[in-house]
Amino acid sequence: MQKILLTASVAAVAAAMSAGAASARDQIRIVGSSTVFPYTQAVAEEFGNTGGFAAPVTESTGTGGGMQIFCGGVGVDHPDITGASRAMKEGEYKLCLENGVDSITEVQIGSDGLSIAHAADGPDLDLSKAQIFQALAAEVEVDGEVVANPYKRWNEIDPSLPDAEITVFGPPPTSGTRDAFVELVMEEGCEEFPAIEALEGDRKDEVCQRMRTDGPFVEAGENDNLIVQRLQADHTALGIFGYSFLYENQDTLKAVAVDGAKPTPETIADESYTVSRPLFFYVKNAHRGVIPGLQEFVEEYVSEEAMGPGGYLSERGLIPLSDERRAEVREAAIDGKGFTRYTQ
């Protein structure tokens, strides 16, 4: 089914590998998003069990970190695939082009609900985006003025909320989950405050996007399993991560509702849970036909058995695309359709 032509960059990779067999690798190398990582790992395990090719090596680097590594160049010293919990940015695409990575295929694998959760024995919580913004922003509106965030306890924001310290474990700036959280929660939450809405330009962006660094928000790194472990140890804390981590730990964690809706396969699919986002991986087309098994791995990833309804990725919390969209994505992924969002 492979329709990729041997381009100049593919030939360059092949030449490099034939020039020094010691530098060639027989394993696919994958970096990127901690949210996409469990899905990619599941496909890698399935692929490795089929025989014929070595199991891919996967590394959770965060979306931003993965893009930097992926776009570093073409050849056996650079990864073949990067996972992403947001779409590739224009600056990242330009970095790829600067380093000769000029043929990339974008593959949307499904949808995800960016989840806020806490220990299962904690109180049921329903937070508005405005309340979440007040808890986590570096600056907030108080009495009509924009000031450094004074809130230390949830009931200081609203008396109906628990009398408990605000402690929220979340992703670092290199994470696509962080990018999505800022866009879908923080920026929307800040719209509820007139003094912030009255700000202009970069100042407004700064207030709406900057997370607090004085203790209540804790950057927990790119390993979302560590956030899960911290919530299981601290029953008053909240954590921010992809839906799969909530799905896999339903016995010890429960979701916080956001604006009245909790993340479920149904609410994420119909977008009534408004903190939903697409998930992707990007493949370097110059490496197809050169890195053993890369084309076959892509085909496994987009197979109906993997990403279809009832497939083994949905069993891990991935929300499948519609039938029509899945067919479109599958064809583009297998054929190596070029990434064109920033070239039109």
Image (spheres, grey):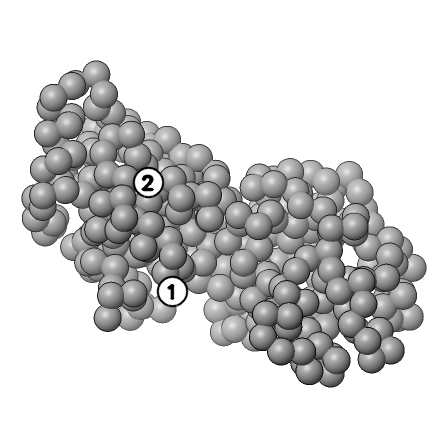
Q: Tell me where residue 92 appears, x and y as whole percent.
A: 37, 53
Q: Residues within 10 Å of mark 1 (few under 14, many from 20)?
A: some
**Quadrant location, the C terminus:** bottom left
Vertical position of residue 193 compared to residue 121: above or below: below
Label 2, secondary structure: give it: loop
Camera-nearest label, 1 or 2: 2
x and y, in percent, of residue 241 in the image: 60, 52
Instruction: Report the Cα–Cα distance between label 1 and label 2.
Output: 30 Å
Residue 176 visible from this viewpoint: yes
Give 251 or 215, whichever is nearer the viewer.
Answer: 215
**What x and y, as percent, mark residue 122?**
81, 54
User: Residue 276 vs residue 234: left or right?
Assistant: left
Q: How many marks?
A: 2
Q: Alpha-carbon neighbours of circle 2 within 10 Å: few (<14), some, or many (≥20)?
A: some
Residue at position x 27%, y 44% in the image: 99
In front: 143, or 10? 143
12 relative to 90, above or below:
above
Q: Which residue is mark 1?
A: 321
Please give the name of the residue rendered at 28% of the width and 39% of the height, measured from the top-left corner.
73
Q: Amino acid at mark 1?
A: Leu
Which residue is nearer to you in this view: 224 or 6? Answer: 6
Q: Is residue 43 visible?
A: no
Residue 91 relative to residue 22: left or right: right
The residue shown at (18%, 43%) is 286
Q: Earlier in the sequence, mark 1 or mark 2?
A: 2
Q: Which mark is residue 134?
A: none
Question: In the rendered structure, which amino acid carries the disc numbered 2?
Answer: Gly
> Which secondary structure, mark 1?
loop
Query: Residue 243 lies in what quarter of the image?
Result: bottom right
> In the image, residue 213 lies at what x, y percent?
73, 50
User: What residue did someone put label 2 on?
Assistant: 72
